Amino acid sequence: MSGLDTWRGPNRLDALRGPSKPVDHNARSIAALAANPACQRRAILDAAGIDKGSTIQHLGYPHQFGQSPFALARQEQFKAIVKAHGGAHILRLLRELLHLSVEEAGYHNVEDAADDNGRAVRHRHTRTVLRSAAEQPEHAATLFDDPLLKLNVAGYDVYLEPDVIAFQVGRQFHVVAIKTFAVVDGQADTPKVSAAAREAAVYVHALRELFSSLGLDPARVAHDVVLICPKDFMNFPTAALVDVRHPLEVLRRQLERLSRIDDILDELPPGLSLDLRMEGKTPTRPAAELAAAVSALEARYAPECLAVCEMAYFCRAEARACGSLEALGRTVRDDLGGLESIDTAIHLISGDPVCSPEQDAIATRLQYLRRLHDEAVA
Amino acid sequence: MSLLRSYLKVAAVRDGRAQRATTVRHVHLADAPLVFVPLRLAGEAAAPLAAMVGDDRAHPHLLVVTNPRNRDERFAFMAELAEVVVSYIERFTTQVEMSDTRTPYERCLDAPQILVPNPAGVAFTRLLGRSTRFRKIEGPHAVPPRVPLLGRWLTFLHDRSEFADSAMLLAMTGLLSEHWVTGQSAAEDAKLSTQLAWIDPPHGLTGAEAAVQAEDPLRSPPAGPDTDPGFDHAVLQPLIGGYGVTAQLREALHEQLEPTWNDMWQAVDLLRPLPEGASVAARWERDRAALAWHQRWLTDGGLPQGRLDSAVAAARRLATLEAAQQSYEANRAFDDPLVMADYRAAGVAFAGRVIAVEADRKITPPGGKRAVLRPLVSVRTDDSVRLSPGTRLLSPARPKQKAHLESVEGDVAVLQLNGGLGKGTTLPGVGEIICYADLDPEGHRHPSLPDLADTPWTHGGPPAEYVPTDEDAQEVWS
Ligand code: SF4
């Protein structure tokens, strides 16, 4: 990654976004950057720090990625339990999980500070503590609460707050992630575990970047993260090691792509703007104009977008309007491979002549399916 | 089912409404199913918030927990739920008959059927079962007697539901997409209201238009168990745990649940008129037998189902699940030409006209001494057959008559018949339209009446050796 200190200069991404401040990223949103790596629209919106939630609402679609206040309250409550008494639970779990004989352990808490300046201070402090820990391997295992990491996303610095970093356990540094989904009888919901792994991978990545910048071996940051969840139906924490190598690699590739965003920007119409023209809290840009601007960014809509991208309803409407087969799912696209649109498929089903030799095979297949279908329902 | 489904998806977009994926209904539909729409509090594993439940669409029971984080209230909710669900199940478990098979066994005359909106509802049902079945009914953490019983029944129903051939606990979205193909993606079909919009769009709207309307959480709240975060924020938060707001809370949750409740019954109405597939009754019979087994287990003082299967039990269970799946798929194809069409599209089945039959052909099989009857049947087919010679085939018209493929040349497939040729059987006749498939509805069937000791406990046999501890009863269940 380049340009760690060259951020917020006037550049083409700022020009695209207009005068609004870029949105704050967090581990969740960074993990989501890689959700649809083939999509240039998403890459540009994310790189420019554009508020996708406000954008989609101004385009006339609901913003559907809210979080329930109950879920947030539960997270706070469980984190407090896990971190109570100098991280007693975390130490117990580390002992069990990593087979350590950690008798005593240090506990660092970096005071929370809200403004940008405070964050820079906290981040510097994080660097100092981590460096001295890394350079003094004889030190006892330490839990580092409320650390602040920094990551560069397409030229912008993003601050990240992992729950806890545990260090010097077997000379390794572990990211600790605290989640509230239950592990019942040793089993948890797979999609939730994967999402937690993707998020934790962001912290591992940021921590490794930090190690590199300190001239330390990034491999000392373990690719196994410690995932702490409630056990069964209790408030009692249990933990598992989760290997995040795969999401780490996916993330690394996407961040690299975003750092080369210039190539994509070169292709955009000159003067393109995604500015909502906010007046106070009200966007004043005509929605149709904004829609046209968003449409100028090449999208790759697939139904998977619905679960991971704020823009999904807009992109879906667009994909449907041009008869995208992929909007029906990848299986359909693959089964009818080679056809550019649903309309073509409909024509071929009704027996219209093919217009290109490539369509020959698929036309035959569709006619065959039609015969089988009609025979069966006759 | 893939190729034909893709074809039907395009057709659904073309026609602006869902297409039938079957000609019959492959799943038993009870005369009086129990519809169960549960909601949970966001962020909690199994803290129920509310449920609409009942077998009378005009009079649903609305159960509400006014403070889901309060343990006593949760158990009061579970006690209320037990009243409805256990009473419903006991309507069936009390009526038992003996089978008239060679080894007679018990089976109930009918069985319960619980319908939930989606797979998440099934998973939540499992968690409700897990969180209640170990509770003690006396001592320091006592719960009302029917609570652990409810837990054991929900666990039983969930375990059975993992078998493809069981119909006692079903997710409606799965049931619908088994019978219809919409013009939207599978991800979108996961939402009951939009799937229904495609299957039965309101007058004057296309499926696509109706589905977009049905996506609006204000109009069609999520079908649970997770609630809409917007609703949590704007409506629920000010009411949860508040004083004197019970009536408002009930009303708010009623409004959230009612659209899904109505959707569920609309779906039942859509499924009801489909004629039942030929093998549906036999599958339901297995559910009835499993129900009787489990009732006997309870009556005899058996322990609740364990927390985890032993490795052996888990492996056996997996094999049984697999077998049930294969047998179910084969049966569906044999019961339904439209399902069979998909196998034909894939080249593992074919249909055509019989053009020649060598009825008296006798051969001496390799290693055998006597010549035996092995008729040859030639079928002319337009299907593209992708089967290699030697593959065993069966025909839905004569499922007992074993055959294998001798050769395929051009559009003629030649089969040799190897069994099911005794008295009272007929051979395919020249001119007959016939279908053969590399499928065997009987082949993988788990025995309908295994030894009790060999029966996985999910089928009523002995459970894994798990003895619940006091710790189980005390789990805080937060
Ligand atoms: S919803 Fe649109 S912008 Fe988002 S990833 Fe999908 S195609 Fe790209």
Image: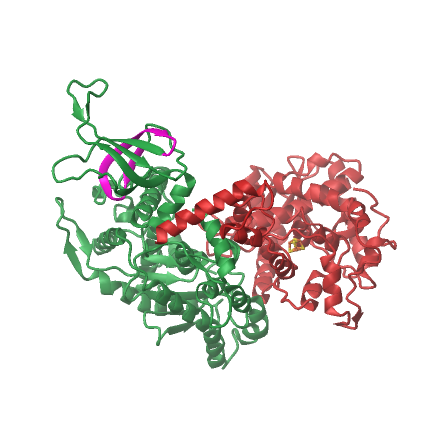
Chain colours: A red, B green
Q: Nearer the viewer, residue A18 or B209?
A: B209
Tell me residue A91's x, y (percent): 59, 46
Residue placed furthest toward the right:
A10
Q: Based on the picture, tell me whether residue B187 belongs to the magenta stretch.
A: no
Dominant secondary structure, magenta: strand
Q: Nearer the viewer, residue B157 or B67?
A: B157
In-image side of A125 versus B432 (left or right): right
**Residue B61 occupies quadrant:** bottom left
Instruction: Say if residue B468 shows up in the picture.
Output: no
In-image side of B375 versus B128 (left or right): left
In-image side of B265 versus A209 (left or right): left
Quarter of image, ligand 1: bottom right
Q: Residue at x 69, y 36 (%)?
A: A220
Tell me residue A376's x, y (percent): 36, 50
Give the vertical position of B390 relative to A93 (above or below).
above
Tell me residue B120's x, y (percent): 46, 57
Instruction: Say if residue B200 shows up in the picture.
Output: yes
**Residue B385 occupies quadrant:** top left
**Which residues lie in the magenta part?**
B392-411
Tell me residue B6's x, y (percent): 48, 49
In-image side of A334 versus A176 (left or right): left
Q: Based on the picture, tell me whether residue B395 belongs to the magenta stretch.
A: yes
Residue placed furthest toward the front:
A353
